[in-house]
Image: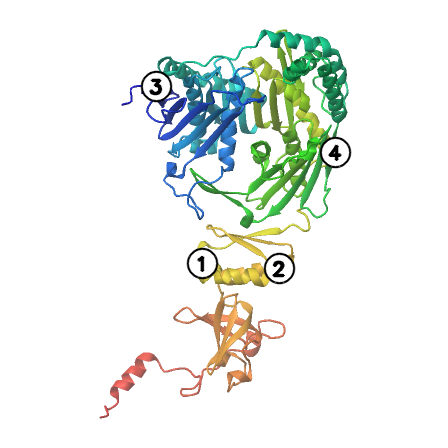
Amino acid sequence: MFDNYFRKDINWGGKTLTLETGKIARQADGAVMARLGDTIVLCTVVGARSVKPGQDFFPLTVNYQEKAYAAGKIPGGFFKREGRPSEAETLISRLIDRPIRPLFPEGFRNEVQVIATVLSHDMENSPDIVSLVGCSAALTLSGIPFFGPVGGARVGYIDGQYVLNPTLEQIKQSKLDLVVAGTEEGVLMVESEAHELTEEVMLGAVTFGHAAFQPVIQGIIELAEKAAKEPWDLPEESAETVALKKKLAELGAASIGEAYKETRKLIRHSKVSEAKKAILAQLSEEEAEAAKGLLKDLEADVVRNAILDTGIRIDGRDTKTVRPIVAEVHVLPRAHGSALFTRGETQALCVATLGTGQDEQIIDQLAGEYRENFMLHYNFPPFSVNETGRMGSPGRREIGHGKLAWRAIRPLLPEKEKFPYTMRVVSEITESNGSSSMATVCGTSLSLMDAGAPLKRPCAGIAMGLIKEDRGFAVLSDILGDEDHLGDMDFKVAGSEEGITALQMDIKITSITPEIMKIALEQAKQGRLHILGEMAKGLSGARTDVAGNAPKITVINVPKDKIREVIGTGGKVIRDIVETTGTKIDIEDDGTIKIASTSPEATQAAIDRIKGITAEAEVGSIYNGTVVKTADFGAFVNFLGAKDGLVHISELANERVNKTADIVNVGDKVKVKVIGFDDRGKVKLSMRVVDQATGADITEQVGARRPRAEGEEGGEREPRGERRERRERRPHRD
């Protein structure tokens, strides 16, 4: 039945990577079942056979989706089925999209949809790398024009050694989590989080990963030799298009070049737009319609050649200079921490808020549920680029940019034990002409330090660009938006003065060389150090205390066997403490209790309540208490929070007491001394040996209590054994 079934097993770093095709999803243009361990992903590709009228872009869609059954789970929520993509699914979709997008031919406009569906997750091998490889194989087999295949790998760094595709457990011990993808010739994409590693270590990780996935590329090629479908015809550039490009260059290269000498973004865009209109006005109606899609190529040629020829960029800078920077902190008086970071025409308003453990984000993934105490949310409103647009939930770009900044900051956060706060930063991009994600890194670092979060070191980021032609190349520091659109590389590096914490690279050409990467990393280091120096003018380190309107968290510890008493039946005790003191309280399984409040008095009241519940009464110690019940034989006094003890009527006062109510009543505040415990462990208290005004111990002044006579009310009782013998000697009555 499965006549076109093919399978390829690849020995990859000591594990077997299996690629199968021809059995499942046979109506797709390309379908591959990729397996590593017991992690299995179905990757499918479908391409439209025709182009929609008027379409002038390449509509590629990549969707990565996780199915709950892959981990033996049932989805949560009311509907019990998978819903909108999670943040992790969105990020992995981007991870697959970025290396494959540059490999479709120029001018290809057919819609292509790539879907990766996780069918099984073994909790050891991450499905993102399996998905990337499987999608590359499916594209290679589909016949759709694709200059692949692409390989990918995850690289860890443990005990000074690179580790290929570390397991989920190993990655927890690694100082590096780096994903690299590319072709046989070179690297196309890098995404990473690092613990202040050097440029040499990062470059070594990239080259290690590139070499490590070469067997995968070779395996895909061998599978394609058996199973690939007939290739589609490549789009060819017509003679008319070539002639029109030449004509456009003759008519408008000079005016476009002059317009790009304007250093201010909005004015420059206006001048470029006017130059384009003047060019189109010199063409026939048919030529003008065809030329609209070619003018961007003319812009790119003008800008790129000018940089290579003169070394001077659009805004007049050389290739290494960073635009002017202004770093301001505490710009919002009621926020816990805030910063306004401005670099040229790019600006980020970053606002930090401190919360408690109750504010942690619960993240449910296939590999399990966990809590996150650091959140970074990035917003890119249309006004930041002088546009109108839809306002709604964050898109893929906003999620991706926010995650990059999150990765850059996270390795520098204080340990949770030292700073037990939940931290949320919101980055509002108010202007954009260049890397707003790197501005977010800088602004987030400043806002957290302004909030009092003791970062290990400040963090800064810079975006690098590349202009590469056959006659040479130029690496650009702190690229503008236009240089990003018209260039060949978007290379973002973030870190502290000690090393790199995040690196992201996207290549728009087939690949770049290690030499270019080395130059870009060194140039980025110099730029990063310069930016850190400018940031220090606003704030060089964390404030010594959190903001006055932020909750102050006090940490105490109680014995683990006392946790149940603090919580109470059904949470009754802890709820009462929270409601009466106005604090927030988090209790952990190890006995750690975190009390949060803006009021020191409320915090102390909660501490006193908790210590009263967990403390043990000590013989000889004096406590404040409240009478909670009276009886003929004495009064019950609540002390140490939830503990009660008995003050026998003989211990109420130093003189004879006939009635308990003559001395105390319910609700009275008294001072008591622990004088012992009965056979059942109940506390015996005394009021008479404590000065009720001062709380002083007056045992020596009042002396010991005289023994009570037999038969006297409240006197000493006859020993139990003697009472039993006396009863047995009595005559029985009918």
Residue 162 appears in the picture as rendered: no
Q: Nearer the viewer, mark 2 or mark 3?
A: 3
Q: Which residue, given by chain and number where applicable, does mark 4 sit on?
A: 537
Q: Which residue, given by chain and number where applicable, does mark 2 sit on?
A: 602
| Label 2 CA crowd tier, 10 Å (few <14, some 14–19, many 20+) | some
Q: Amino acid at mark 4?
A: Lys
Q: Amino acid at mark 1?
A: Arg
Towards the viewer: 168 or 22? 22
Q: Amino acid at mark 2?
A: Ala
Q: Is residue 378 left or right of residue 258?
A: left
Give the quarter of the image for residue 243.
top right
Towards the viewer: 7 or 502? 7
The spot of residue 569 in percent (x, y) is: 44, 62
Q: CA distance from mark 3 to mark 1?
A: 57 Å
Give the quarter of the image for residue 447.
top right
Q: CA distance from mark 2 to mark 3?
A: 67 Å
The spot of residue 249 in percent (x, y) is: 69, 10
Q: Amino acid at mark 3?
A: Lys
2 or 4: tag closer to the N-terminus:
4
| Label 1 CA crowd tier, 10 Å (few <14, some 14–19, many 20+) | some
Relative to 338, say whether 269 is above or below.
Answer: above
Q: Which residue, given by chain and number where applicable, does mark 1 sit on?
A: 564
Asked whether the beta carbons under mark 2 and mark 3 sit within 8 Å of each other, the answer is no
Give the SS element for disc 4. Answer: loop
Towards the viewer: 496 or 241? 241
2 or 1: tag closer to the N-terminus:
1
Q: CA distance from mark 4 to mark 1?
A: 50 Å
